[in-house]
Image (cartoon, rainbow, N blue to C red):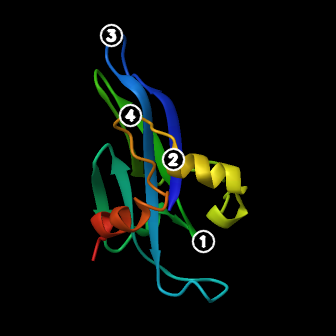
Amino acid sequence: MYSWYFPKDSPSPKFGHRHDWEHAIVFIDNPDVPNPKILGCSVSSHSGYAKYNPCPSYAVDGTSIKVRYMHKWPINHDLDITGDAGKFQDLIMWDQMTEDARRALNSVSFGSANTPMNNWNFERKIEKAWPF
């Protein structure tokens, strides 16, 4: 699961709210091999998902998927897959975070925006995004 935090969800003036989380989930065949095969992927849009089974080849770059962020005027933003070239972003694993960072993600209230990768939401989000 790759997660992005947005301090303000405001795609247009006078609309929006504080805090939002969006995320992309890549489903692979075996996490224990050097080059796992991507079997499917899902990307979030507020409380729903766009699910792909299989993940389209145009959106796969080696062992990564290409994701785009887009706002839809007047009231929404979301993630989706794309074929467009982009940049790789650093991946920080849950276990690489300090205990303080993990504690904050588990305990800080982001209002109606739920931290997708914390201890209470991770498995539920994986189940809801399951594309198979």
Residue type marked 2: Ser
**Quick one: label 1, few (<14), some, or many (20+) residues within 10 Å?**
few
Q: Does residue 50 appear anywhere in the picture?
A: yes
Between 50 and 127, the one lying in front of the other is 127
Sequence-first tag of 3 and 4: 3
Tell me: residue 77, above or below residue 30: above
Residue type marked 4: Gly
**Image quarter hosting the C terminus:** bottom left
Tell whether 72 sits left or right of 38: left
User: Which residue is under mark 4?
Assistant: 111
Element type at marker 2? helix
**Quick one: label 2, few (<14), some, or many (20+) residues within 10 Å?**
few
Element type at marker 3? loop
Element type at marker 4? loop
**What whole-number distance in Å separates the C-alpha atoms at marks 1 and 4?**
36 Å
Rendering coords of residue 96 (x, y %): 72, 62
Element type at marker 1? loop
User: Which residue is under mark 3?
Assistant: 14
Sequence-first tag of 3 and 1: 3
- Image point 46% across, 40% down: which residue? 69
Tell me: residue 85, above or below residue 53: above
Between 49 and 106, the one lying in front of the other is 106
Q: Does residue 90 appear anywhere in the picture?
A: no
Tell me: residue 109, above or below residue 122: above
Q: Are marks 1 and 4 in contact (CB under 8 Å)?
A: no
User: Which residue is under mark 2?
Assistant: 107
Q: Which mark is residue 62?
A: 1
- Image point 37% across, 23% down: which residue? 17
**What whole-number distance in Å separates the C-alpha atoms at marks 3 and 2?**
29 Å
